[in-house]
Amino acid sequence: MKLAVCVKRVPDMDVRFRIGADNVSVDEAGLKFDLNDFDAWAVEAALQLKDKNAGSEVTVISLGPDVVQETIRKALSMGADRGVHLKADKVPFDGFAIASALATELKTGSYDLILFGKLSPDSANGVVGQMVAEMLDLPCVTAISSLEIANGRGTAKRELEGAQEIVEFPLPAILTVDEGLNTARLPSLKGIMAAKKKPLESRPAQLPQPQLTVMRLELPPERKAGRIIGEGSAAVPELVKLLQTEAKVL
Amino acid sequence: MANVFAFVETRGTEVRKVGLEAVTAARMLADQTGGGEVHALILGPPGISGKASQLGQHGADVVIVVENPALTNYSPEVATATAAERIKSGGYRAAVFTTSAQGRDLAPRVAARLGVSTVTDVLSFEIQGDKIVVRHPMNIGKVIATISIAATPAVISMRPNVIAPAQNQKAGRVETAQPAVDPASTRVKVIETKQGSRDKLDLAEAPVVIAGGRGLKAAENFKLVEELASAFGNAAVGATRAVTDDGWRPHSDQIGQTGRLVSPELYIAVGISGAVQHLAGMRTSKTIVAINKDKEAPIFKVADYGIVGDVFDVVPALTDAVREAKKHH
C-alpha cells in the first residue's frame, strides 16, 4: 500500500502562553514542540498497515518552516519511509490554504490511503483532512477510532452524538484519526539512527492567498479564584444554597 | 442586506438544540447586516417537515426541507452536496454550522466545495465594515483569537451552548427539496449504527455536566455520578481521560484536550484532580463545582465552589439534596 500521513509540529499545551509583541502570534520562547498527538496516532495507524502489507511505503508530509523537518524525522524514526517538507515561512491559520497546498502535493502521489490527525490543539479548527478530501474528490471518514483494511476496502468506527457508526469505504480514501485508535510507538534508538538516512525532500508550499486574518490574540480572562466552601457531606446544604441563590443553576 | 444560511442538525425526527442555536446565530448575522432572510436547511427522515414551524419561531424566513427515509442518520456526502449546492445558488453572505461531531465533519467539506475557508468552534461574532469577525479559542482555550473572514460566504461553526436559542417569529416558509446526491449511491456506507439512548442528553448540549475521575476508584462507582445526573434531570455524564483510557467509560465521554469540549451552565467534577488536559475541555463552563478529597488538587483553583471530602460521602448527599430541591420547583 502507498500511505501518506500529514503531520503538524505543535507546542506542548501544559504551559502558560504569552502573546508575541505583534499581538497576532504566540510567543514561542521557551515552548517545547512535538508531533501532534492525533498525528502520532495517524502515523501509528499507517505503520500498522505497513507491517501487515509487505511492500508498503509510508510518506510523512508536513508544512511549515525548516524546523518542521524535526517533526518529520520523528515520524521517520517511528518507522515511516520518506518525508516531504512543504516549506513556508510559517503555518498559516487558514486551514483552507494549508489544505490547498497539501492537496497539490498529495494529488500526484497515487496514495491508497491518506491519514490526518482529526485536529491540532494550537489552531484548533480540525478542518484540513476533510478539505483535502473534497479537493481531491476522495471518500472521507473523520474521527475514526478503529480501522481495518482488506481487499481494497476499509472499515472504520466513528462516534457521532448519540451513536457509533461502523462505516465501509473504498480505497483510495482519506481518514482523520481520533483518540482510542491505537497507542503510538516510541522511536527506538535503531529507528532514530535509521531516520537520519531516510529521504526527506523539501519544496516550497503552494499556498493560496489566505482568506482568514488573525487580527489579535489575547489571553482569556482568568476565572476568579476558586473557593472551598467546606468539608464532607456537611458542606452539601451550603453548596445547594449557593447553586440556588448565587449561581442560580438549581 | 444579506441573506444567511443555517444548517439545522437533527437526530431522527427531532431538531437538536444546536440546530436552533444555528438558526438564532444566523438570524443575528442577518439582522446585523441589514435584515436579510435566514434560510434554514434541514435534512431527515419523513416527518422532519413537521419541525419547520419550530425553526420559523427562532427566526427562519425559509425552511428548506429534505425528507428521505435514508436520512435517519447523518450522511456526510448527502449533507455536503445538498448544503453546498443550496449555498452556491442562494448567494448567501454567511453560512452557519455547529461545532458538534456532525458539524465538525460537515462544515469543512462544504466550505472546501465552495472554495472558501472556514472557522470552527466560534465563540462570538460581529460585523466590522464588510467583514465578519469571529472569536475562536486556540491552544486548548488558553488563547483567544479574533479572526477576520474575507471570504463570501463566511462559513462558521458555532460552539454549542454559547448562543441561547431565541424566539424571533418569522414566516418559516417551507420549501421542499431533494437530496443533491442519491443517498443510496454514497461512497462511504454506514453498515452498522449502535444507537445510544435517544433520551440521553449529549455532553455538548446538556445544561449540566457531571464528570467523574479516578477518584471514583472503579467503573461501577460511576453509578453515583449517573444518579446525581438523574437527580438534576437535565445533566449528561462525562469522564476524564484517565478513566476512558482505563475503559471505565467510552472514549466518546472524555472531556478534555483530546476529547469533548463542553461549556454547560453547571459543571460538577467528581473525584477529578484537574489535569491541564481535562481543564482544557471544561474551563469555559459557567459555574464549576469540585468534589475531591485532596484539598491541593488543581481543580479547586478553577472551581467556583469546592467541597473537600470523600466522593462516596459527598455525592450521595448532594444527590439527595438536589432531588429535594427539584421537588420544590
Image: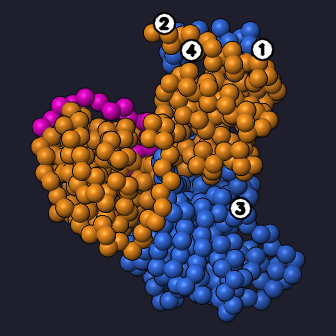
Chain colours: A blue, B orange
Can residue B142 be seen by looking at this rendering? no
Start-end of magenta stretch: B157-171
Q: Residue at x 31, y 60 (%)?
A: B70
- Where is residue B324 shown, x and y percent of the image? 56, 10
Which badge, 1 or 3, is on the more N-terminal residue?
3
The one of A187 and B94 positioned closer to us in this rendering:
A187
Q: Nearer the viewer, mark 2 or mark 1?
A: 2
The one of B234 and B157 positioned closer to us in this rendering:
B234
Q: Say if A74 sits above or below B255 in the image.
A: below
- Where is residue B206 shown, x and y percent of the image? 48, 33
- The chain that hosts pointer 1 is A
Quarter of the image where one finds residue B318: top right
Residue of label 3: A33
Q: Is residue B158 magenta?
A: yes
Q: Are marks 2 and 1 on the same chain?
A: no
- Secondary structure at badge 4 equals helix
- Secondary structure at badge 1 equals strand
C-alpha separation, residue under disc 2 versus residue under disc 3: 53 Å
The label shown at residue B323 is 4
Q: Amino acid at mark 3?
A: Phe
- Secondary structure at badge 2 equals loop
Residue of label 2: B328
